[in-house]
Structures are given as C-alpha cells and as structure tokens.
Image (cartoon, grey):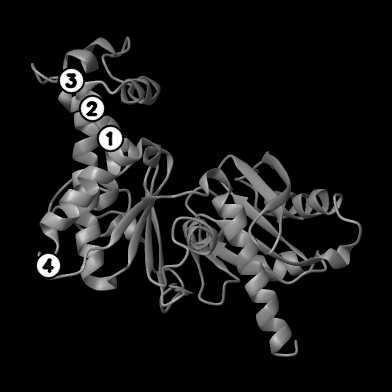
Amino acid sequence: MLTIGIDIGGTKIAGALVTADGTPVRQTKIPTPASDPRALEDAIVDTVASLMEGTSSSGEVLAVGIAAAGFIDATASRVYYAPNIAWRNEPLRERIEARIPYPVVIENDANAAGWAEYRFGAGRMHAHMTMLTIGTGVGGAVVVDGQLFRGGFGVGAELGHILVEPNGELCGCGQRGCIEQYGSGRALLRFANELAEDEQLGAGLRAARGADGRIDSDSLKRLLSEGESGAMSALTTLGEWIGRACAILGAVLDPNIFVIGGGVALAGEALLKPIRESYIQHMPGRGFHPEAEFAVAQMLNDAGVIGAADLARQHYEKLHSSGR
C-alpha cells in the first residue's frame, strides 16, 4: 500500500507516491501559487489527482502527508504561520480532507525531511537524532527515543534560532546572534566575501568577484568544488559555528547522531571535519562525555516528500488502530 507525500516550497510543489520502505514510485512537480491560499489548496488537490493517475485504484493509497515551511499546530492540522506562503491560522487539514477521500496530516518541512533521514537515511538505527539543514537559512528536526519532537504548541525544533553569539548579527526572526546568521548558506557567502579582503587567503576569492565587486553563490560553489584555499577557509569557519551550535544542542538533547543536510552538506567531510572538531571543543564535560556521530544526509531533494508520506502512513495506522 502507498501513501502520498507533498512538499510545498515557496516556488514549487513536489509530490510523490511512496512505498512503505520509503521508495518514491511516481513523482510530480508544479509551480506554487504562494500568494493565493485557495489556489494553493487547488494545487494540492490537483497534485493528489495527478499522482493517483499512476495507480490502479484509489484503495491503493492510505493517506496524504503535506510538508510546508512554517509553524504547524500540535495536532498536525493547522498552519499557524508560513513565511513564504499566504497562510495565517489556516485549517489546512480540514480544507484538504473535505476535497479528497484520504486522511491528511500536516507537518513542518524540516521535520518531514528529518523524519525521512531517521527512518530511511543517515539517522536510521539511532533512536536519538538531531538534524540541521544548512540552506539559505538553518532548519532542523529532532527525534527523541524514536519519536518526532514537536513541542507543546507544535512549533518546536526551530534550531536555526538558538543563540550562538550574544549581540551578534541581526536575524530575520528579530533576535541577534542566531546560528542561522553564522551557519547558513548566506553566512558562508558572507564569510567568503569578508575573506576576499585577506591578503594571504583572498586572492582566489577576489578573482571570482563579479561586476558588483561581490562573490555570488555560483562562483563560490565552483571555488569549493575546486578546493580553492580561501573558499575552503570560509567553509571551515561555517563548520566551526555549526559545531558550536551542535555542542549547545547536545547539552540539551544528547543525540546519538547529528545529521547535516541541505545544499552546503554536499561538501561532505570538508564540512563535517570542522563541525566535529568545534563540537568537541565546545561540549560540556569535554573528554568525559560520549561524543555523538556526524553524518551527511542521504535523502537529498526527496526527503520532504518521503518524510511526509511516512508520517501520513503513521497517521493512518493510528486512526485505524483507534477504530476511526
């Protein structure tokens, strides 16, 4: 039996039919009508219908999971707030269930991706996992004793907003010094542009500047792929900040493993090494506390739909076991 996973981003909606072992068997993508909640609702329903065209009967599908960036309530049914989509206190599960013949569960996109890693990826076999997703910002997910942590209001695990630098850079959340300002892809780009002024390390970075006198993300990716020394130094700085955040999270959550995801994680060991070293340097009880493992996420771009689909399967099984 299959479940449907839908991952709603600011620019596209990805959907997939997913097997019980986390394998997508049919996938689709359409643009996101982010400014119109009703059009977005239609797009979700159309995505479900498109995926159903690949099945022999509607009975093959058990449930639908929808992942979206934003604050989701503890019942996994209502979107309190979405930063890139016009949802404000939106009863999304109720609206979608009224239009499709399947039970629906709503989940934060980072939680869904983290759950996919826990169930089928780098975090499998670890009952306590913390995932940091390093993209434009910093996302996160926490699994505690095999359960996805959501918090009392459903909006827990906003790991990008833990404080790592008092009175530091201003964050989009309104606070200063969040790890999102030091451990994200945007931070990496800032570090590279700052290092371009360094006489010893900055030559290669300066040569990559565009007409505006800045290094853009594509140029930085190229330099990292070439192992250019200035770019690698910027990556090391990024890793040091992420490692500091992991030490803070480790003191609270004590995970067996940290999984690092997002586009920057494709740097692999070049990023994990400074993360690991900084984590050990900043961990409480250094030398006496067991050290967590570090791994790069394995599910890549499919993590959101796979995690959402698996959470939908759990939701269906819970409803079935309660006789609903």
Q: Secondary structure at mark 3?
A: loop
Separation of residues labelled 3 and 2 (CA atoms): 6 Å
Local crowd size for mark 3, using a 10 Å CA cut-off: few (<14), some (14–19), many (≥20): many
Type of amino acid under label 2: Ala
Q: Secondary structure at mark 4?
A: loop
Residue at horizontal 29%, vertical 30%? 189
Circle count: 4
Mark 1, residue position: 188
**Depth order, front residue of 75/258:** 258
Give the left or right position of residue 22, taking residue 141 as reference.
Answer: right
User: Which of the labelled discs sits on residue 192, or is there none?
Assistant: 2
Residue at horizontal 30%, vertical 59%? 293
Type of amino acid under label 4: Pro
| Marks 2,1: beta carbons within 8 A | yes
Separation of residues labelled 1 and 3 (CA atoms): 12 Å
**Depth order, front residue of 95/247:** 247
Task: Determine the image quadrant of residue 96.
Answer: bottom right
| Marks 3,2: beta carbons within 8 A | yes
In the image, residue 75 sits, relative to residue 117, either above or below, namely: below
